[in-house]
């Protein structure tokens, strides 16, 4: 089993939509944990990577289906069995762990103080969410009159740009798997992923993604470029 880290830097405001809003306040809320930290579900992230991988495979010559086999090993196939299921597990993309741990500890301490001495909390989950997000509003324009359509105003919460999220990626490769091709496909899919979240086809959710690995007793090292070179060499041959 090998563990990698996917780093996501937000280059524009992004909405990690959860499919609902808050009545009377906002039409589209972002996914966030009990402490107010926004995050992107691993299941959603894996689907985005799968989409980018499939788009790339449509563009490269693969007469012997080596890349297709690597793709099926990495992402699995429809109706997969134990033998053909995906070798990759993607965790939730979250803000840095040390930040979340510090806030979690403060939450627990203030919760105990509130119960024992009725001391009000100095920070709440709403405070955390508000500090990392903002609201964006949009409306529809009537093409005939060039004025806003009635009842078309919509509001959504967005995660602020420049924030960085990380997601763990676990690969359980078998001895028969072509690990170089699988990692190359993963790396180019990560690089190709440039839009995430709700409204990604309308200018939101612009991101930069990179793949990292940590060897024993070493710092995290970016491996995206290394595997990209292998992909370029193999597809040119």
Image: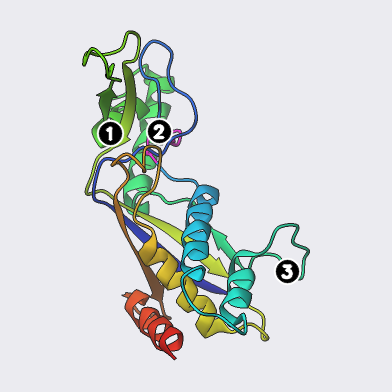
Place of residue 92 in the rendered image (x, y in percent of width and height, measured from the top left):
48, 51
- Residue 120, can we see it? no
Mark 2 or mark 3: which is in front?
3
Q: Quadrant of the C terminus?
A: bottom left
Label of residue 133 in the image = 1
Q: Is residue 109 above or below residue 101?
A: above
Numbered label tally: 3
Residue that numbered label 2 is attached to: 30
**Sequence-first disc among 2 and 3:** 2
Residue range (magenta) = 30-38
Label of residue 84 in the image = 3
Asked whether 142 or 97 is in front, the reply is 142
Place of residue 43 in the rendered image (x, y in percent of width and height, measured from the top left):
55, 50
- Dominant SS in magenta: loop
The secondary structure type at the circle numbered 3 is: loop
Badge 3 local density, few (<14 within 10 Å), some, or many (20+)? some
Badge 2 local density, few (<14 within 10 Å), some, or many (20+)? many
Question: Does 7 appear in magenta?
Answer: no
Q: Is residue 236 above or below residue 26?
A: below
- Residue 189 is drawn in which quadrant? bottom left
Place of residue 179 in the rendered image (x, y in percent of width and height, measured from the top left):
55, 82
Q: Residue furthest front?
A: 144
Who's the residue at 44% across and 22% down the image?
A: 21
Check if mark 2's residue and mark 3's residue have beta carbons within 8 Å.
Answer: no
The secondary structure type at the circle numbered 2 is: loop
**Marks 2 and 3, how far apart in space?**
34 Å
């Amino acid at each position: 089993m090998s563990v990698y880290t996917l780093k996501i830097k937000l280059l524009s405001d992004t909405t990690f939509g959860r499919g609902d809003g808050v009545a009377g306040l906002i039409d589209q809320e972002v996914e966030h944990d009990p402490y107010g930290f926004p995050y992107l579900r691993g299941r959603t992230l894996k689907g985005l990577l799968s989409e980018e991988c499939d788009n790339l495979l449509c563009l490269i010559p693969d007469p012997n289906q080596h890349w297709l086999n690597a793709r099926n090993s990495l992402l699995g196939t429809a109706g997969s069995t134990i033998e053909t299921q995906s070798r990759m597990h993607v965790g939730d993309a979250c803000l840095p762990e040390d930040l979340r741990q510090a806030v979690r500890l403060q939450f627990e301490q203030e919760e105990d103080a509130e119960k024992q001495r009725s001391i009000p909390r100095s920070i709440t989950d709403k405070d955390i969410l508000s500090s990392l997000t903002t609201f964006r509003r949009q409306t529809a324009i009537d093409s005939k009159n060039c004025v806003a359509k009635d009842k078309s105003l919509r509001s959504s919460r967005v995660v602020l740009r420049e924030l960085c999220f990380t997601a763990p990626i676990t690969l359980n490769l078998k001895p028969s798997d072509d690990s170089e091709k699988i990692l190359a496909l993963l790396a180019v899919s990560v690089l190709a992923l440039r839009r995430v979240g709700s409204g990604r086809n309308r200018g939101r959710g612009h991101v930069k993604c990179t793949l990292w690995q940590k060897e024993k007793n070493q710092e995290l090292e970016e491996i995206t470029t290394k595997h990209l070179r292998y992909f370029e060499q193999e597809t040119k041959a």
